[in-house]
């Protein structure tokens, strides 16, 4: 074998991302059009699933998809659901989620899904159709300024103007989406680009770019060693330390490192809504979720610590409450984040560390093990004594009932039945989301899938069907409300067509529950347009879509209904569970209040 032959055999492997299959070779001769190049790029990136909805501007792309069988396209019933489903897939697997929509209303329907992914830093590539290049700017049929509309809600976007740039643009899009702080990237492809053929002058078939270099984009991976040394010294000298972590730990695959660090130091730890599962809920050092509906002990510890290690979190308004109140207590803050713009954005920090959280935590652990100093055992024991005093408030306790179904009981029962199974929980947004976060004890990362930053109603079902496609042997439950589920309920049709048997648990309290709770507390019980007066028969609706519907109205029937849903392994089951319409989510920090100014229940009103 001569060297040229050996190099030719090695080259295709070098063009592929790690752990992705080799892209199918192109024909020995012949030209590829833009759509065929796009499909080859997706294959080269190892894309297995693509969620989308066809339209005039993307029909050449759909024709190219028709001619291959390595990528499974999932036809959703609404473009918003296409992006949500790809988003849910990305959250559960860590892979880049991919969606495809047409121009104009296809793009605008997808905007909510793109913004949802952007707020939670989810790696995605959204391919959008566009009117032909000569028609751009002329108000052509189904034209919109995709680049302009999506600019504030993407990590980056591209308008492809030359078919020769298409492969490199896709390479850049996937690179940007998955590296640094992840996020969605939009690639806008005019129809004429999708149909234009690229001359195969080399005669070697399709070749995906081997590498990508972007002068303007070079995310830092390794944290500054000097800053890490300062952080170690501060942590080991702390009297009242606290470890506060967010979704960045999960996105950065750093849960194992976080758990090792927590055990090594013996310090209390909390997770944000997006970080649940990074620390096992069963860990005695875990104080529960913090923030607006966090536990009393987690919030009080946050407010009274003297050294705070923040990892992959952004001091969100739902986490720290009023910044002035949070800043009223002096503390030293170490902030680790891949995105330098997140550091000192809302709260001034003392030791900023920019870098990949996994890499930084590994170096922190190494330096702590090598250090001569050790935490002050007496001070740490006294700190734990104070924390345990706060724990004794039992802020998540609720009064059970034999007359009405308490939503907390439903989630707790689901946890008991599934805690030893490989289970994924998705949620929509509202009271049910908070009850799921509070009462389902997550032990592993990427098992809790919800919209944290944007707070998007309607994500739960598309998330679930995206996850079920990727994890067919796992249990996937969507905890929702009768308001949220109607936002994307048409996706029950998608679940039937693609055989993704998810279980929908609707905590139906006949209200827009979180709106009603705020109106009760802050608006003098003036329940303006928060009561759902014309709800459908969800059981019949589920059956109309070809699924199983179960109505649950008594507390004693909840466990049996959940078991029945689990028994029907290969069917999508919709449980319409009629819950107490007066139940509120506690604890609660009202808007404008400080993190330790919590309402713990009706006795505090």
Image: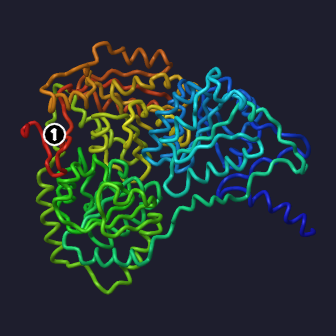
Q: In the picture provided, is 71 more to the left or to the right than 472?
A: right
Mark 1, residue position: 398
Q: Which residue is pictured at 52% across the width and 48% down the height?
A: 155
Q: Residues within 10 Å of mark 1 (few under 14, many from 20)?
A: few
Q: Residue furthest top?
A: 534
Task: Point out the image quarter for the C terminus.
Answer: top left
Please state the horizontal and vertical placement of residue 100, each as a whole percent of the image: 61, 34
Please state the horizontal and vertical placement of residue 386, each as a whole percent of the image: 12, 64
Q: Which residue is pictured at 92% across the width and 68% down the height?
A: 1
Please state the horizontal and vertical placement of residue 201, each as a whole percent of the image: 90, 48
Please state the horizontal and vertical placement of residue 314, each as a whole percent of the image: 35, 54
Can the viewer see residue 496 in this picture? no
Can the viewer see residue 605 in this picture? yes
- Tell me the element at label 1: loop
Q: Quadrant of residue 459?
A: top left
Q: In the picture provided, is 176 more to the left or to the right than 46?
A: left
Q: In the picture provided, is 412 more to the left or to the right than 394?
A: right
Q: Which residue is pictured at 67% across the width and 53% down the height?
A: 20
């Amino acid at each position: 074998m001569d060297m040229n032959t050996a190099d030719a055999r090695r080259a295709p492997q070098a063009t592929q991302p790690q752990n992705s299959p080799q892209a199918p070779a192109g024909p020995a001769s012949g030209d590829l059009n833009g759509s065929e190049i796009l499909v080859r790029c997706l294959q080269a990136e190892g894309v297995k699933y693509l969620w989308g909805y066809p339209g005039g501007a993307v029909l050449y792309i759909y024709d190219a998809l028709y001619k291959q069988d390595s990528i499974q396209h999932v036809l959703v019933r609404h473009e918003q659901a296409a992006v949500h489903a790809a988003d849910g897939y990305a959250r559960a697997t860590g892979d880049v989620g991919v969606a495809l929509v047409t121009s104009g209303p296809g793009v605008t329907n997808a905007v909510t899904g793109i913004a949802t992914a952007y707020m939670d830093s989810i790696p995605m590539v959204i391919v959008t159709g566009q009117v032909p290049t000569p028609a751009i700017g002329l108000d052509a049929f189904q034209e919109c300024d995709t680049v302009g509309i999506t600019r504030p809600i993407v990590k980056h976007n591209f308008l492809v103007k030359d078919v020769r740039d298409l492969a490199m643009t896709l390479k850049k899009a996937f690179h940007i989406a998955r590296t640094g702080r992840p996020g969605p990237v939009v690639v806008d492809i005019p129809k004429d680009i999708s149909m234009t053929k690229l001359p195969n002058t080399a005669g070697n078939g399709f070749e995906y770019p081997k590498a990508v270099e972007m002068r303007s984009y070079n995310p830092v991976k390794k944290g500054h060693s000097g800053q890490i040394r300062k952080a170690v010294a501060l942590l080991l000298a702390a009297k009242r330390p606290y470890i506060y972590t967010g979704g960045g730990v999960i996105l950065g695959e750093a849960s194992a490192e976080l758990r090792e660090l927590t055990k090594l130091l013996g310090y209390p730890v909390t997770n944000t809504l997006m970080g649940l599962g990074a620390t096992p809920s069963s860990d005695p050092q875990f104080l529960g979720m913090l923030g607006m509906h966090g536990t009393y002990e987690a919030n009080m510890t946050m407010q009274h610590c003297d050294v705070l290690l923040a990892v992959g979190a952004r001091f969100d308004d739902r986490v720290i409450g009023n910044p002035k109140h949070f800043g009223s207590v002096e503390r030293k803050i170490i902030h680790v984040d891949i995105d330098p713009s997140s550091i000192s954005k809302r709260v001034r920090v003392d030791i900023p560390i920019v870098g990949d959280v996994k890499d930084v935590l590994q170096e922190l652990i190494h330096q702590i093990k090598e250090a001569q100093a050790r935490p002050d055992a007496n001070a740490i024991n006294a700190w734990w004594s104070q924390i345990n005093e706060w724990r004794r408030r039992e802020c998540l306790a609720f009064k059970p009932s034999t007359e009405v179904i308490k939503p907390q009981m439903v989630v707790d029962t689901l946890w008991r039945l599934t805690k030893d199974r490989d289970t994924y929980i998705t949620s929509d947004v509202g009271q049910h989301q908070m009850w799921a976060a509070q009462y389902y004890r997550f032990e592993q990362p990427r098992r809790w899938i919800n919209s944290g930053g944007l707070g998007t109603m309607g994500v739960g079902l598309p998330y679930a069907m995206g996850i079920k496609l990727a994890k067919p042997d796992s249990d996937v439950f969507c905890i929702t409300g009768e308001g949220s589920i109607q936002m994307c309920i048409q996706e029950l049709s998608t679940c039937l067509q693609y055989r993704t048997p998810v279980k929908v648990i609707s905590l139906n309290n006949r209200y827009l529950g979180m709106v009603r709770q705020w109106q009760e507390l802050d608006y003098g019980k003036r329940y303006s347009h928060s009561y759902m007066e014309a709800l459908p028969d969800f059981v019949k609706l589920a059956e109309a879509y070809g699924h199983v519907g179960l109505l649950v109205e008594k507390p004693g029937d909840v466990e049996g209904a959940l078991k029945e849903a689990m028994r029907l392994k290969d069917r999508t089951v919709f449980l319409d569970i009629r819950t107490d319409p007066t139940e509120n989510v506690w604890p609660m920090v009202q808007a404008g209040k400080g993190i330790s100014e919590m309402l713990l229940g009706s006795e505090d009103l």
